[in-house]
Amino acid sequence: MKHHMHRFRTRAVTTALALMFAANTAWAVDPFQVRDIRIEGLQRVEPGTVFASLPFRVGDTYSDEQGSAAIRSLFGLGLFTDVRIQVSGDVLVVVVEERPTVADVEFVGTKEFDKDALKKSMRDVGLTEGRPFDKALADRAEQELKRQYINRSLYGAEVVTTVTPIERNRVNLTFTITEGDPAKIKEIRIVGNKAFSESTLRNLFELDTGGWLSWYTKSDRYSRAKLNADIETLRSYYLTRGYLEFRVETTQVAISPDKQDIAITLNITEGERYVVSSVRLDGNYLGKDDEFKSLVTIKPGEAYNADRVAETTKAFRDNFGNFGFAFANVEARPEIDRSNNSVALLLVAEPSRRAYVRRINVVGNTRTRDEVIRREFRQFESSWYDGNKIRLSRDRVDRLGYFKEVNMETQEVPGIADQVDLQVGVEEKPTGSLQLGAGFSSAEKLALSFGIKQENAFGSGNYLGLDINTSKFNRTIVLNTVDPYFTTDGVSLSVDLFHRNSRPYNDQGGNYQLETTGAGLRFGVPFSEIDTVYFGGTVERTTIKPGTNIPAAYLAYGDKFGYTSYSFPLSIGWARDNRDSTLVPTTGRMQKLNAELGVAGDTRYLRSSYQYQQYIPLNKQYTLAFNGELGYGKGLSGRPFPVFKNFYSGGLGSVRGFEQGTLGPRDVTGSVIGGTKKVTLNAELLTPFPGAGNDRTLRMFGFVDVGNVYGEEQKFELSDMRASVGIGLSWISPVGPLRLAIANPVRKFAGDRIQKLQFQIGTSF
């Protein structure tokens, strides 16, 4: 501490002397009856706090032992730097000097941490505004700051504390921090491996010796927690390949004298590789042995696999839970035969007792209302414990997309053997997203789109979205809101308000416009946990405003049916979605089928579309994704399909490498007019980004896109399909998922408008 602490050291000496001579002070006074007690020196401490700590009251007989006890008791409060007891006749005067209080805590020189986070860590050690200050508290604060920096591999960080006394016996604390450079991992060694190469084992680790993306991943910064996680990954790698007796003997972490380089050495013993010889069941399986046997994924003749053993025991416990046995105990007991390097597994089960769910408690939702979470539950209070319904409830809450984590824990009810409570813990995450899009072309130069979406508006579970496109040729504003529980049975209500103003994609320019304004209402009825049927209606007004380079098809339609059309289409659709995530899916399938039927007004038509997505996990790092879309439109009652309802293709979301919406039929002027039939096929292989390890927020993908749009009189021809291949970058950025694609059209025709570089925030495929 600096010289500002000198006065506090002097007070500490005074305190020690007071304790040493307290007995002498009391010894010099003969016992007497106390007529009055006065306290002097208080500034902020309440007198009652002092009186409550004194071992005597007015009217008691005062002695030297009581005086010593009083001084010790007052010092024990931690509020005073000096305590004295003076005797004036039969009056006791307690003289105290309060410790200074902390007025402000400031940090200078910190870059690695946000100051608010450091202040929180200071509160955890008891150092905060308004609290009494002492040197021991400052020392603890320094140690806590150093510990925080060590956790970030900043071993050379230095902390200097400055104490500045101010008025009213207060102090300002300033922690001046010299962070230095972080220590980097220079070497990772694995000693004792025989079955697998050292490089193979090191590639399993999140920690590494650095690469060109280490500034982003920080994978070369040592962390004890990360090392422990890597050790568990290493252990799992061996245990899933038959090495039942694998162990890590020692873990050595050495740091260089300048605290800049770290070397990690793991000494391991692999043991022998064991093969499963047999799997047997023992215990009480509720008379359903065959049903439980069907859940066993461990196969005799294969190497011992700890993951499959864990999967099997978990499947057993889950199956017991389906019958209401919340406390089932399932244990896998290996019987090792070292002479033959084989192991026999005995699965022992004890279902214990059947249970009811007494109460469901929801914690962690600081923003989202309780009812938004509880209405997703399929396990109810005062009902039999059902493992399937509990897992389904957890998945439904997770699929809301409002939370980083959703955990469900079963807690026994004290004193009641057949009841449990469910503790549902959630961790909130931002549910608003900003969507930005941009593209470059010779026609539009720079086209921008903007959108704001709030998935959980005001914690109500309702969706609210605004989309704006400021393109030179396509201007759009759309307001959309969805109430997912318009009724208590889960029927959703969606309301749309929109205004669109489009112009042709034409290098020579044009000033005609296609203007559409309308409003829509749609209901969604859940028919199963993953199936929803939608139906609704829309009111639209579409105006064709003639101008230069207007497509002949638009003029022909306007001359025959009018340049302003009122439409009242009805819509019906179906959606099925069991993907594991809507943001970064790795497995599962999504399907959507929609049909729009113009039944009144100035138009008669059918417009339908179907979308299919499939995600296939190849392993922990690689995912194969497929997307297919079909569109079909047809005019009814002797009328043609409205040209302003045509499908468009090209660009992000369809066939990358071509300008947005430029595929398909064109007018003699070269203007794109879309078509009544649309086909899009996409395939992607998602891989780790080089240097980013297994970080799933930053990934690369290779893709193949095929598709086109066809006019009403055109036949579907494979020879007319456009195709492109390319690579891209997927990043879960702070403002939403960003996808950047560099595409090379491998099948194109004269007149096609190429755009090799495209990116968008908030889209997929």
Image (cartoon, grey):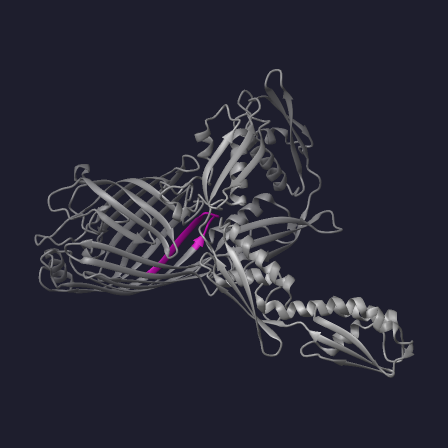
Residue 467 shows in this picture: yes
Q: Position of residue 146 (x, y in %)?
A: 54, 54
> Which one is in front, 214 or 144?
144
Figure check: 363 above or below 133: above
> Which one is in front, 257 or 422?
257
Q: Is residue 390 magenta?
A: no
The image quadrant that residue 248 belongs to is: top right
Q: Which residues are magenta?
A: 525-537
Taking the image as shown, residue 418 lies to the left or right of residue 112, namely right
Q: Image point 54% across, 49% down: which residue?
A: 394
Q: Position of residue 243 (x, y in %)?
A: 56, 26
Q: Main secondary structure of the magenta part?
A: strand
> Which one is in front, 142 or 479?
142
Quadrant in the picture for the N terminus? bottom right
Figure check: 641 above or below 332: below
The image quadrant that residue 136 belongs to is: bottom right
Q: Image point 27% across, 57% down: which residue?
A: 598
Q: Image point 34% across, 54% down: which residue?
A: 762
Residue extending farthest top: 339
The image quadrant that residue 746 belongs to is: top left
Residue 308 shows in this picture: no
Q: Position of residue 718 (x, y in %)?
A: 19, 37
The mark total stands at 0
Taking the image as shown, residue 617 lies to the left or right of residue 476, namely right
Q: Position of residue 224 (x, y in %)?
A: 54, 44
Taking the image as shown, residue 10 lies to the left or right of residue 518, namely right
Q: Is residue 535 magenta?
A: yes
> Which one is in front, 189 or 612?
189
Figure check: 39 above or below 727: below
